Amino acid sequence: MSKISIITSFLGLWLTSYLSDNNQIIFGFFLIFTFGILHGANDLVLIDRIEKKKKKPFIKIIISYVIIVLLSVILFTSLPTLALLLFIIVSGYHFGEQHWQIISYERNLASKLFELTYGLFILGLLLNFNNSEVSKIIIEITSITLSPIVYKVIVLVLGLFLVCFSYLMAIKSSDFKKNILEQFFYLVLLCVIFKSSSLIWGFTIYFIFWHSIPSLNDQIIFLYGSYSFTNFKNYLKTAFWYWFVSLCGITLLYFAAKDLIIFDALFFSFLASITFPHAIVILKMFKK
C-alpha cells in the first residue's frame, strides 16, 4: 500500500501546479466525501463482527454509536476548545495507529505513545504549513487566536518527542529499525506536499491516500479474510446506506450554513463527531 500512497502523492503534488485553490478545494472535498467517508461507513458492520462473541443485539450497537456521535456534537457546542483538542488527539492517534500497522513490534503503552506522537506530528506539519487558514477555523470554533510561532513550537516539540520515541522503538524492534529511513522519506514527502498545497488539498492527499485507502484495505481483510475486487464490492454493498446517510447529513449542513463564515468550523465539527466512534471501532478491530 505504501507504493500506491507514494505514487498517488506525487500525482497529487503534480496536480497542485495545475489546479487553482478553488479547484483544489472542490476536488479535495469530492475525495473526502467519497473514499474518506466511505472508509468509516462500515463501522457498525465492523463492531457487529467484533462484538459477535458477546452477542450484543445490533440495535444496541447502533444506539451506542449514535450516542457517541451526539455526545461529540454536544461537546463541540458547549465546550468547543476541549472538543477541538480531543479531536486532534484522537485523530492523531488514529492516523498513527493505522500508519504503523504494517511494521511488526510489540503493542504496549510505549508503542501507543509513539503512534500518538507520530500522528500528531503529521497533523502539526499540516497545520504549521497552513497556519493562516487553520487560525481562521480555530477562531470560528473557539474564538482563540494563535500566532504562527505557536504552530512552529508545537511541531518542534512533537518532533523532539518523535525522535526520542523512535529511538526507543528502534532498540526494541529490528523490523522498526529497518524501516526508519523509508519512513523518514515519507515524512519529507509529506512536508513537501503540505508546503506546496492548500490546507484542504494537503489534508486530502494524506487523509485519502495515506489513511483512508489503507484503512479500507485492512477493513476488507478483517471482514472477508482477504482483499479482492469481489470483496471490495461486498464492502461497498454493506457500506452504501451508511455512507449515503452521512453524505445527506453533510449536504444538509452545507445548505444550512453555506452563507455563513462558520461553515468550515461546522464541517470540521461534523468530521470530529464521526471520527470519535470510528477511532474506537478501528482500535477494537486492530486488537482482534
Image (cartoon, rainbow, N blue to C red):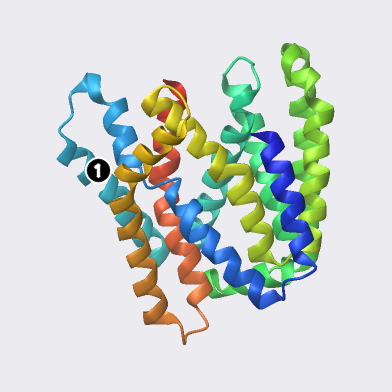
Q: Nearer the viewer, residue 163 or 101?
A: 101
Determine the image quadrant of residue 160.
Answer: top right
Q: How many labels, in total?
A: 1
Q: Residue at position x 65%, y 77% from top?
A: 22
Residue 116, x across and y down, in percent: 61, 36
Q: Residue at position x 81%, y 46% from top?
A: 189
Q: Residue at position x 28%, y 53% from top?
A: 241
Q: Residue furthest bottom?
A: 259
Would residue 64 appear left or right of 12 to someone viewing this image? left
Q: Nearer the viewer, residue 85 or 61?
A: 61
Determine the image quadrant of residue 2.
Answer: top right
Determine the image quadrant of residue 163.
Answer: top right
Residue 37, x across and y down, in percent: 44, 53
Residue 4 in sight in this render: yes
Would residue 187 appear left or right of 39 to someone viewing this image? right
Residue ID for mark 1: 64
Task: Give above or below for 10 relative to 246.
Answer: above
Q: Nearer the viewer, residue 13 or 52?
A: 13
Task: Give above or below for 7 relative to 72.
Answer: above
Residue 81, x across and y down, in percent: 52, 62
Would residue 47 appear left or right of 176 to someone viewing this image? left
Q: Quadrant of the C terminus?
A: top left
Query: Are there few (<14), some (14-19), or many (20+) residues within 10 Å of tag 1?
Result: few
